[in-house]
Image (spheres, rainbow, N blue to C red):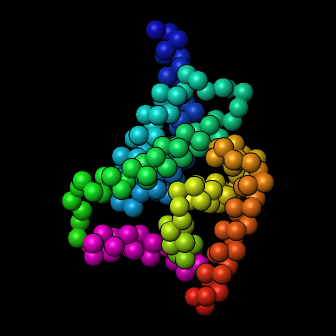
Amino acid sequence: MMATDSLKERFQALFERHRKIVFKVANMYCRNAEDRRDLAQEIGTQLWRSFPGYDASRSFSTWMYRIALNVGISFARNAIHREKHSVALDDAVADAIDENAVLSEPDERVRALHRFIGQLDVLNRALMLLYLEDRSYREIAEVLGISETNVATKINRLKQRIRTGITETGQ
């Protein structure tokens, strides 16, 4: 029982220090509050289940991002199935709610960036989240399971798409 209590205390301390990661990932992959709560809960559950295998010699935040993003990506991929078997709000109401969340940002460039990120596929969305969090290419590569060269290439392509998109809209 002592070992379990100690493990639980270590997990809780580390989780509390890095809990914002869970909410950043949930916000990146879910449009509505209920889905964000469900995803955050699923991420927390998976983190706890995986914690006994965590290697303390490595960065906890990198480990946490890797699990959170994997859960977020799976959640996003399964969203299609969930949408087929659920009744949604009227589209106009849902769009107004989502648009209001983006419109609350005072800077138009930041709103444009949020819209751009929201249109990305799940891997590129994860890449942008980590890049905007000032994670190193090495850490991004480790979290996403791709090479640093691939990270650099993808980021450069995304930056170009952002530049092009802003130029085309006249901002």
Q: Is residue 123 left or right of residue 99?
A: right
Q: Quadrant of the C terminus?
A: bottom right
Question: Magenta span covers which residues?
Answer: 91-110
Residue found at the very far right of the displayed protein? 149
104 in the magenta segment: yes
The answer to whether residue 52 is visible is: yes
Residue in the foreground of this view, choosing between 132 and 155 = 155
Give the number of marks.
Answer: 0
The answer to whether residue 114 is visible is: no
Q: Residue at x 76, y 50 (%)?
A: 148
Q: Residue at x 52, y 53 (%)?
A: 24
Residue 129, x across and y down, in percent: 60, 57
Residue 12, x across and y down, in percent: 51, 30
Residue 6, x across and y down, in percent: 53, 17
Relative to 54, is 168 above or below?
below
Relative to 116, is 165 above or below?
below
Q: Residue at x 54, y 47 (%)?
A: 69
